[in-house]
Image: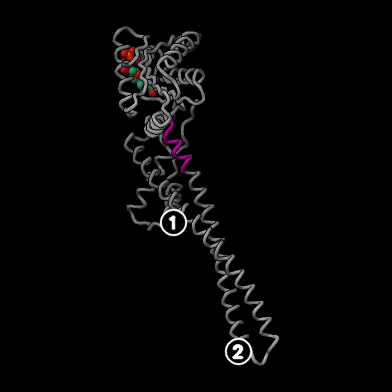
Amino acid sequence: MTSNPPPVNPVEIARIALKRLAERGLPPTPENYAQFYNAIVTIKSPGTKTNDELQHAWQVLCKLDDVLAEARDTTAQLLESLSESGENMAASLGQLHHARREALLDEQSHGTMTALLEDIISSTHTLHASVSSSHDDIVSIRDSVKHIEEDLAYNRKMLEQDPLTGTLNRQGLDHLLAREVKRAQRGESKFTVVLFDLDDFKQINDRFGHLVGDQVLVHIANLARAVLRESDFLVRYGGEEFLLLLPETDLNGASYVADRLRLVAAKTPFIHHNRRIEISFSSGIAELHADENGRALVLRADEALYRAKHTGRGRVELAE
Ligand SMILES: Nc1nc2c(ncn2[C@@H]2O[C@H](COP(=O)(O)OP(=O)(O)OP(=O)(O)O)[C@@H](O)[C@H]2O)c(=O)[nH]1
């Protein structure tokens, strides 16, 4: 389902890193350069990086996100105040032109005033032109910030995605879980997680090889997607372990989802060279408590999963 990332070209990475530094007005010191270079390499080839490197790249992206959000606010304020100044100046220019026409009617007595007004008009013209050109500059800065934000959103998505199954990964889970827990607690709605782990997956790898094992993981992720609602989330939590986040769902609803997935998986075995590879899994389900955080919730689901595994596989256990 996923293709390998294209090989990383160091010259291209160096060029992008220098461009990114220039765009942010950062000096190209060896430290700044190295940081950006590494972040870009990591983003371009996430599959080949360690968790620490991915974590670091992700943190750099988060910082950049913050900086960009500030830049966006500042440019919006500047644009607003420049537009206002531009309008005021245009109005003042109109008044000055009017005053000059009046002065020209009585040339002798107002000669000096006319000269003065000419001076003022000319310097206001210059000022007005520079306000307009600053306005254009800021509009173009705003456009580049928008492009950088789009790039960042794309890169962040790549870092939060499991390259094999295309589901969210642990990195992506952290802030999503915190957000969904907060949302549920604010709206006093139910929120339940299902942690499931494929049974005897090692045997599948051992019998059919790691590549077939990979395809089985993709297969089960696709089945899970088909069973879930649009508002649910699927996360690859570990090697052969997946986590479902189910907003607006209680223990009964989550048990129903786990059961449905079990039936679908039983009816849709993975076929390899005309041989059926049966897939079963064990699940632990936990519903959010009012004063609980996401980590504690997943930990309870994990404990329930542990019980399910150790009381005979293919079972579902509910956390208290
Ligand atoms: N093909 C493949 N295998 C993986 C991946 N990640 C983890 N594994 C394998 O998953 C297997 C997990 O083995 P165990 O932890 O013993 O679990 P199990 O065999 O499923 O046994 P139980 O969970 O106790 O039912 C190991 O063989 C890992 O190598 C992956 O991305 N691809």
Vertically, is 223 above or below 181? above
Q: Is residue 312 magenta?
A: no
* Image position of 218 with respect to 277: above or below: below
Residue 49 occupies which quadrant of the picture?
top left
On the image, which quarter does residue 239 sit in?
top left
> Residue reaching furthest bottom?
108
Q: Which mark sits nearer the N-terminus, 2 or 1?
A: 1
Which of the two residues, 26 or 14, is positioned nearer the viewer here? 26
User: Is the C terminus in the top left, top right, bottom left or bottom right quadrant?
Assistant: top left
Q: Amino acid at mark 1?
A: Ala
Residue drawn at point x = 34 percent, y = 12 percent: 317
| Residue nearer the viewer, 255 or 138 | 255
The residue tagged 1 is 22
Magenta segment, which residues? 152-163
Residue 219 visible (yes or no)? yes
Residue occupying the point 36% across, 37% down: 54
Label 1, ligand 1: CB separation under 8 Å = no
- State how far apart marks 2 and 1 are (Cα): 50 Å
Q: Position of residue 303 (x, y in %)?
A: 29, 18
Q: Nearer the viewer, mark 2 or mark 1?
A: 2
Label 1: how many Cα within 10 Å (few below 14, some 14–19, many 20+): few
Most extreme residue toward the right is 105
Residue positioned 53% across, 64% down in the render: 134
Q: Is residue 151 left or right of residue 95?
A: left
Residue 21, given in percent of the width and then of the height, sits at 41, 54
**Residue indicated by mark 2:** 112
